[in-house]
Amino acid sequence: MINTEGAGLSRRTLFGAAATAAAATMTTGATASAAPRHAGDPRVTELTADQAWRKLVAGNDRFVAGHQKHPHESLAWRESLVNGQHPFAVILSCADSRVPPELVFDEGLGDLFVIRAAGEVLDTAVIGSIEYAVEHLGVPLIVVLGHASCGAVSATIDVVNGDAEVSGDISTLVRSVEPAVRATAPNSDPAAFLAACVAEQARRSAGILRERSNIVSDAVAHHGVKVFSATYELATGKVTKL
């Protein structure tokens, strides 16, 4: 049972005990690559990254089957979150209105720390938001979630092929997705090529996050945090890890 108290933790509070344990382990010659991040602090989730993923999969299975539980929507639960939050996963997903993570994973208030940007494009605000969830809320899992028929990726394909032009800040978005499109092997089937580009964009965003964020890379290397990429199928509602 996750405690409902606030989770406004400093980096020292969140990681200090883990660092001490790591140092002690290293002096004995053993590896310390998976030291606990929160050192038993009751204000953060007790789930590991793998347990958090299994929880997401179970919720998505319910969503696919139409057997949702719609958890954590009651008045009492909402009131319990007034003083703080304790999400068990970060979801970076596309802004597409057809892919709301809380519904896709059948979770409720306070369960997921959701950041949405077209094409799962990373900017400083997106990365900073993820870092906050990892460092101050003790979230063990980050999922970058692409989806079938992504408009941002489709538009980028058209621009790369010379079939369209974009203006305004949409051009910035397209430039951010363009490397994924150019890195994807050509395919004579447009639908298959789009799907491959969507998967590549999710994978690339997950990789760029680890490269650009010292906080995330440190948490992955030393504190058991994991970064997964996945795709969502509009027709079935199924999420598949890449």
Image (cartoon, rainbow, N blue to C red):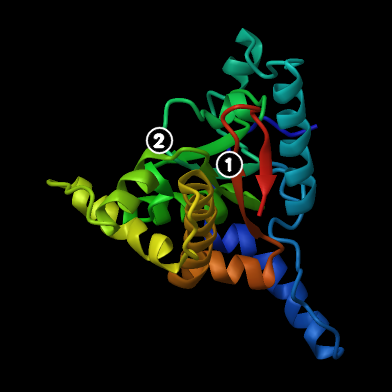
Residue 59 can be seen in this image = yes
Rendered location of residue 210, percent (x, y): 52, 67
Q: Which of marks 1 and 2 is in front?
A: 2
The front one of 118 and 23 is 118
- How crowded pointer 1 is (Cα within 10 Å; few <14, some 14-19, many 20+) is rated as many
Which amino acid, mark 2?
Ala
Residue at image position (56%, 70%) is 217
Q: Give the structural element (helix, strand or loop) at label 1.
A: loop
Question: From what the image shows, is residue 57 above or below residue 51?
Answer: above
Q: In which quarter of the image is the N terminus?
A: top right
Q: Residue 95 carries which label?
A: 2
Quarter location, residue 222: bottom right
Q: Give the structural element (helix, strand or loop) at label 2.
A: loop
- How crowded pointer 2 is (Cα within 10 Å; few <14, some 14-19, many 20+) is rated as some
Q: Which residue lies furthest to the left in this view?
A: 168
Residue at image position (62%, 38%) is 87
Q: Residue furthest front?
A: 188
Q: In this view, does 164 lie to the left or right of 100?
A: left
Q: Is residue 18 left or right of residue 159?
A: right
Question: From what the image shows, is residue 117 above or below residue 178?
Answer: above
Rendered location of residue 237, percent (x, y): 64, 28
Residues tagged 1 and 2 counted as in contact (Cβ below 8 A):
no
Which amino acid, mark 1?
Ala
Rendered location of residue 74, percent (x, y): 64, 10
Residue at image position (50%, 49%) is 189
Q: Residue furthest top?
A: 75
The front one of 153 and 141 is 153
Q: Disc 1 designates what residue?
A: 7
Gap in angstroms between the C-alphas marked 1 and 2: 27 Å
Residue at image position (58%, 17%) is 78
